[in-house]
Each structure stands twice: as structure tokens, then as C-alpha cells.
Image (cartoon, rainbow, N blue to C red):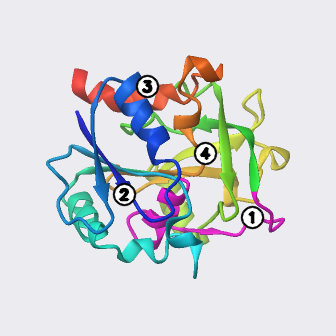
Amino acid sequence: MKFGVVIFPGSNCDQDMIYVLGTIMKQEVVTLWHKDRDLKGCDFIVLPGGFSYGDYLRSGAIARFSPIMEEVIAFANKGGYVFGVCNGFQILCEAGLVPGALLHNNERKFICKNVHIKAQTSATLLTQSVPQDRALKIPIAHGEGRYFADAETLKAMNANGQILFRYCDENGNITDASNPNGATENIAGVCNAGKNVFGMMPHPERAADVELNNLDGKLLFESILSLVNA
């Protein structure tokens, strides 16, 4: 599978993602500059974490208008796979590719630590190989990660299996105490109605290398690559 990792001014997790996809998962990876208009024949597009355009105005709000995003949106609308992590998730929300918004953390502080998340569905490419009874330890690093959607949208998303992950404790219990940023319904990741665009705040690429003593995030990449082996 050929992956394209989009790089915006301020991206700082692009090389982590490239390393995991290319070196650990042994896939072809190309970089896509934010001013490009060519997706280079990629099968899967990744929007990495970081601080695109310095997070000025609002996280992801400027990056959403980068030239490359016109192509990414068209690609997604045709059923192409797109995955946004942290700032990438914020960009997906701003572009309307996934529902909802990402607001300032409830304590208005930047949070950088390991948290636990639990898959809520096995009916998407990103989660089909992730055990739903297992709490995954995945790091977060964000100041605007509090997921929000109105009640009607949440009802539809829950009914359609669009909630990918919820924050939980190490035993898999979804509680208020395990919610690091005040996200509505402990939501840590969602997908679009077509289930080809995925966004999440935690960083699976930072938990996919034996050198980091944590391979929980690798499960997500293995799940994506099950498409190749299908």
C-alpha cells in the first residue's frame, strides 16, 4: 500500500508517522507538501500531528485551506482512505470530513501524557483488528482536543458506528476520571459516515515501536494493512 503523509508548516509528527509506516510496517511512503496538488497515486493519505500554521486563528483552521486539502477532500469524497492524528484530526473537522469540533481542553492547559483508549467498533478499517475488550495505552499531546458534537449528531454517530475510540482507564472502564480533556462522551476518535475518513487525538505512531516499550498503537496500523491482505 502506498501512503502519503501531508506536511504543513508546523507539522512535527510527520517523521514519526513516516518512520512507523515505512520502517516498521514496511510500506511505501511519500511526502506531500501542503502546496502540492498531486497525491502521487497514494492509496491512503495521512494528516500528521503538530501545529500547522502555528495553530493561529484556531487549530487546523488555516491548514484546511491549503492547496493539498482540495485534493484530499476530493479523494475522501470518492471513498479514498484518510487518517488524521491530533492536529490532523483537527484539520479533518475543520474541513468537514468528519463531524464535530475539537475545542480547548476543559482545564485550558496543554496535556502531554499516556492515556488509555478503547475501541468502540470493529466495523472500520482502522479498528477491525483492534480487540474491543482491551485498553490501549496511547500518548496524547494537545491543547485543543476536547471533542464536541451536538446531541443530534452524536445520536446519529452512535447509531452508525462512527465512534472509533473512547478514553478509558487501564482496565477499560469508561469513566469521567479517565477523560483527560473533557471530551463529550469520552470520545477520542471518530470516522465519517462512509467509514473511510478517520480522526483521533491520541498518537498511535508514538506507541508502535519496541524501542518505546509500547506496541499498542501498532495494532491500528496492522488493522489498516489488513486491507492489503484481504
Q: Which residue is mark 1?
A: 105
| Mark 1: secondary structure | loop
Kindly identify the amino acid type of the residue bearing the numbered disc 2.
Ala
> Where does the magenta region start and end?
86-110
**How busy is the neighbourhood of tag 3: few (under 14 within 10 Å), some, or many (20 plus)?**
some
Judge by depth and name the residue closer to the eye, 150 or 223: 223
Cα distance in 3D space between marks 4 and 3? 18 Å
Q: Which residue is mark 4?
A: 202
Image quadrant assignment for residue 154: bottom right
Q: Earlier in the sequence, mark 3 or mark 2?
A: 3
Name the mark nearer the viewer: 2 or 4.
4
Does residue 136 appear in this view?
Answer: yes
Q: Which residue is mark 2?
A: 193
Residue 91 inside the magenta-drawn segment: yes
Residue at (55, 54) in percent of width and height: 86
Q: Earlier in the sequence, mark 2 or mark 4?
A: 2
Placement of the C terminus among the 4 image quadrants: top left
Kindly identify the amino acid type of the residue bearing the numbered disc 4.
Pro
Query: Number of callouts in the render?
Result: 4
Q: Earlier in the sequence, mark 2 or mark 1?
A: 1
**Residue 207 against residue 106 in the figure, above or below:** above
**How busy is the neighbourhood of tag 4: few (under 14 within 10 Å), some, or many (20 plus)?**
many
Judge by depth and name the residue closer to the eye, 88 or 13: 13
| Mark 4: secondary structure | loop
Q: Which residue is mark 3?
A: 129
